[in-house]
Image: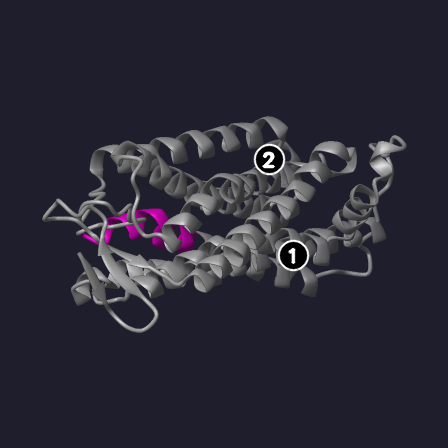
Amino acid sequence: MEFIVNKTDLLYFCHETKQESCLMIIRPSVTRMFLYMFIGSTMSISIICGNLLVITSIVYFKQLHTPTNYLILSLAVADLLLGALVLQFNMALSVNSCIYFGDVFCKIRRSFDIWLMKTSILNLCCISIDRYYAVCQPLTYKTKINGRVVGIMILVIWVFSALSGFGLTFVGLKHTVCEGRCFVFHIPNGFVGPIVSFYLPVIILLGIYLKILTVALKQAQSIQSTQTARNERVSKMERKATKTLVIVMGVFLLCWTPFFLSLTFNPLTGYSIPLPLSETLLWLGWSNSIFNPFVYGFFYSWFRAAFRIIISGKVFSGNYRNCKLH
């Protein structure tokens, strides 16, 4: 059975013989090629290459072996996995809205979506805690935030996110509204999930960074002439690092807030938000994984130096692990 919706799209059923089958949108070949080549390939490659630069820089250069950068490394790994594992499959769903690999495969795909998104926001939460101690309690920072503590943070982040992502999908999340579609999110009660997964962590993040900003302004105003040049330089470096990571958080919010707002209010409006708009907002959220490497490269001189050494191929011709990055 076939329906002509307009001059550009045709509608078919995903399963012709099932009464509860979803409708399948078949887009023209030009549109399909554009989606595959631009959104799928370009975005995925950009995410993989950018975050691979960040990961390689932190792993290779000893100067970048700091607790803060380990959390940035964890965030970059989550973004890399998103580009490598999630985007290509979701691109195919955007082009040919039906899935024929079975319900389990659909659940696994959705679990990875939730897992990596939660990993990103929990990494941002831990980064804010790191910045809080660095700026607000600098004298105890090195004793409270060290490699072992950060390692435990990262382990908890990944394990908790995986358990909640896979558990929510396989146990508590209503995953279908009709046969044949692999919907990204469909939560009849559209409040609990977004509040726990997004709004509550965001409120915590904003509260911590507001406290950091207040303390940083007081520190800048109370710098006395008796303060040593070294302490003043360290204080400025910590404030600059905090400012950069606030920008990272701001980009995250700009990318993901529209999607979670639509996820929250869509049930209240009888799911009146068009599917193409929901998919666009979700792709906007995923695009966040592209921006972080550019933020690091733009604001951190040592990341810029590391990127140049890696891209130029110098790491293959000499030992730069201990070189000074400026």
Q: Secondary structure at mark 2?
A: loop
| Picture layout, residue 162 above or below residue 174 | above
Q: Which residue is mark 1?
A: 295
Q: Is residue 304 left or right of residue 187?
A: right
Callout 1 environment at 10 Å: few (<14), some (14 to 19), or many (20+)?
some
Position of residue 98 measured from the top left corner of the image (x, y, whole percent): 29, 48
Q: Amino acid at mark 1?
A: Val
Residue 263 image label: none
- For the residues labelled 2 and 1, the Cα–Cα distance comes to 24 Å
192 magenta-colored: yes
Front position among marks 2 and 1: 1
Residue 145 image label: 2
Residue range highlighted in magenta: 189-204
Position of residue 84 measured from the top left corner of the image (x, y, whole percent): 53, 40
What secondary structure is the magenta-colored segment mainly? Answer: helix
- Say which residue appears at 59% left-offset and 26% top-offset: 148
Instruction: Inspect this view and state whether residue 263 appears.
Output: yes
Residue in the foreground of this view, choosing between 112 and 199: 112
